Amino acid sequence: MITDEQDRKALIAYRLKQANDSIEIVDFLINNKQLTIAVNRIYYGMYYALTALGLQHKFETSKHSQLIGWFNKEFIKSNKVDSSYGMALRNAFGNRTKGDYDAFVEFTLQDVQQMHAEMRDFIIIVSKLISEAQA
């Protein structure tokens, strides 16, 4: 658990950088037809942003499902964020799990491009939520 506020802010900035870097990495993977790996990175880009949001609100966990549940409770069910972002996050988590653990999984270029757009939008909205909380 992070107790020092300077450390918390540094880790939030680091996680947001990871999230934004993931956008470029996914572009590269899509352009090189590495779609299953792109799906993995799409989820992790969203996860990094969500981890930063959790840190901003002093919610820390190592469990992905707990972090997603917290986001749904605090931001989706309370209508602070449109439910489409919760759906995009759940889909990204499910697709990442399928791509990583199931056999013979293939994703279409169109589907991965749509997931990538949802990831970018998710990172933008989470970044705004963090900025608002810091103001």
Image (cartoon, rainbow, N blue to C red):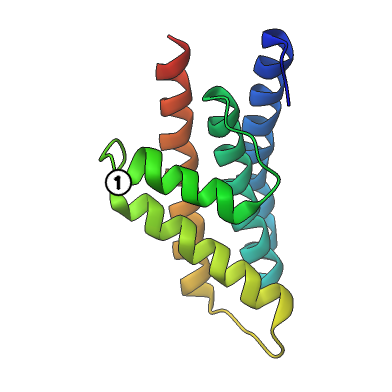
For the question of whether residue 27 can be seen, the reply is no
Using residue 27 as the reference point, say whether residue 76 is left or right of it.
Answer: left
How many numbered discs sit on the rendered protein? 1
Q: What element carries label 1?
A: loop
Q: In which quarter of the image is the C terminus?
A: top left
Quarter of image, res 55:
top right
Please give the residue where the numbered disc 1 appears in the rendered image. 77
Q: In which quarter of the image is the N terminus?
A: top right
Give whichever of 123, 63 is nearer the camera. 63
As displayed, is residue 81 above or below residue 106?
Answer: above
Rendered location of residue 72, percent (x, y): 40, 48
Seen at 38% across and 59% down, the residue is 87
Quarter of image, res 99:
bottom right
Rendered location of residue 69, percent (x, y): 48, 51
As displayed, is residue 37 above or below residue 17?
Answer: below
For the question of whether residue 111 can be seen, the reply is yes
Residue at far bottom of view: 104
Seen at 71% across and 27% down, the residue is 14
As displayed, is residue 8 above or below residue 1?
Answer: above
Rendered location of residue 28, percent (x, y): 69, 56
Seen at 57% across and 50% down, the residue is 66
Identity of the amino acid at label 1?
Lys
Label 1 packing within 10 angstroms: few (<14), some (14-19), many (20+): few
Rendered location of residue 65, percent (x, y): 58, 56
As displayed, is residue 100 above or below residue 130?
Answer: below
Seen at 42% across and 27% down, the residue is 129
